[in-house]
Amino acid sequence: MKAALLTWTAILAASATIQAYAGENAKPLVVGSQGSFFVGGETKTSKELSGSTTGPGAGVEGDVTVNQMYVQYQTPVNANQHVPVVMVHGCCLSSKTWETTPDGRMGWNEYFLRKNRSVYLADQSSRALSGFDATKINAVKLGNAPPSQLPNIFMASHQTSWTLFRFGPTFNKSFEDEQFPVQAADELYKQMIPDLNGFLPMPNPTWKNMAALAVQLHGAVLIGHSESGFFPEEAAMINPVGVKGIVSIEMGCTTNLKPDQLATLAKIPILIMFGDHLSDIPGAFSKLWPANLDTCNQFVQQVTAAGGDARMMYLPKMGIKGNSHMMMQDKNNLQLADLILGWIDERVEGKKVSHK
């Protein structure tokens, strides 16, 4: 009887939460301002602009801008109440990651906006609407460089994505408690695009662009996911002036940082999040996620030892089960957003506000 009572209590609590979020979605969305712009980029002079030996521009030397970062934004009417939030996507994806979920629910960009946060969505340099240096391709086409100099263009298959993102143990078979809306997986696959990061120089210009954006916004919380998960830390180590907080979601962490780098990061509140089923998938991926969690736990310990404010939010340990790698699109995505919002209020802005 007691177990049954607890079960019904949990069901009723979950139902109340769902109804609360549904009510939030039903309210008119009020936007104070919206727009878009580019950050960063560098000018490059090249003779290999068109990749053609005939036609307009053939063989003409000129200047091009490369590695710039596209940013779209929306701000609430009372935008000055909170620190702006910058969201950066992972591998083979774009800023669409943070928008409407594959099954049509509210994404984090809208939810954060409804919670009076200015939201800035960035496409990594070399992805989607951002720029990259295409002269490497033209150089090969014109015979000025060997094909071996072409970098790899990574594309993730449906099968790889299913297991890597931890939707289930095998393709088209999901975990019983899986939070990702697997019935809409085809819509996620449409979001996945070629990853051109192989064309970028190192250090990755996205790091510098993120740091510059934070300065431009007079302070921001930088959120990175997967491939970009540690990008906020990299940005802060380039220029910490505008980085008011860091949220890193499911990635591998760098643990061989120098004392001065740790000292820089120790001045910035850092939150790291990991989902469920990290070792419940086959092959190499079963070792990848536990290893990433381990490096990030080490990183949290190192930052803490340096006097910093770093927290590991491992969802299963908190009793939150079934979350995939794409947690911003999972069925409980707004509940997870509330965890981040609560952390920002408390650790970045020094407030104590509940978002339940």
Image (cartoon, rainbow, N blue to C red):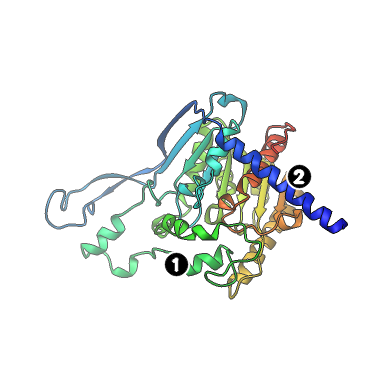
- Where is residue 290 shown, x and y percent of the image? 67, 66
Q: Quadrant of residue 112?
A: top right
User: Front-most of 145 and 278?
Assistant: 278
Task: Give how far apart the Cα atoms at labels 2 and 1 are.
Answer: 42 Å
In this view, the residue farthest toward the right is 2
Q: Determine the image quadrant of residue 83.
A: top right
- List the residue tagged with mark 2: 307
Where is 105 relative to 252, above or below?
above
Q: Quadrant of residue 292?
A: bottom right
How crowded is the residue under tag 1: few (<14 C-alpha within 10 Å), some, or many (20+)? few
Left or right: where 268 falls relative to 35: right
The residue that appears at 56% across and 26% down in the rendered structure is 79
Outermost residue toward the front in this view:
1
Q: Which label sits in the foreground, 2 or 1?
A: 1
Q: Is residue 84 visible?
A: no
Q: Which of marks 2 and 1 is nearer the N terminus?
A: 1
**Secondary structure at numbered mark 2:** loop
Query: What is the crowding at mark 2: few (fewer than 14 residues within 10 Å), some, or many (at least 20)?
Result: some
Tell me the quadrant of the picture where the C terminus can be found. top right
Q: Which residue lies furthest to the left in this view?
A: 54
Q: Which mark is residue 5?
A: none
Nearer the observer, 38 or 105: 105
Instruction: Check if mark 2's residue and mark 1's residue have beta carbons within 8 Å.
Output: no
187 or 307, which lies in front? 187
Residue 354 shown left or right of residue 76 in the figure: right
Q: What element carries label 1?
A: loop
List x then y, in percent, for residue 282. Answer: 60, 74
Residue that label 1 marks = 157
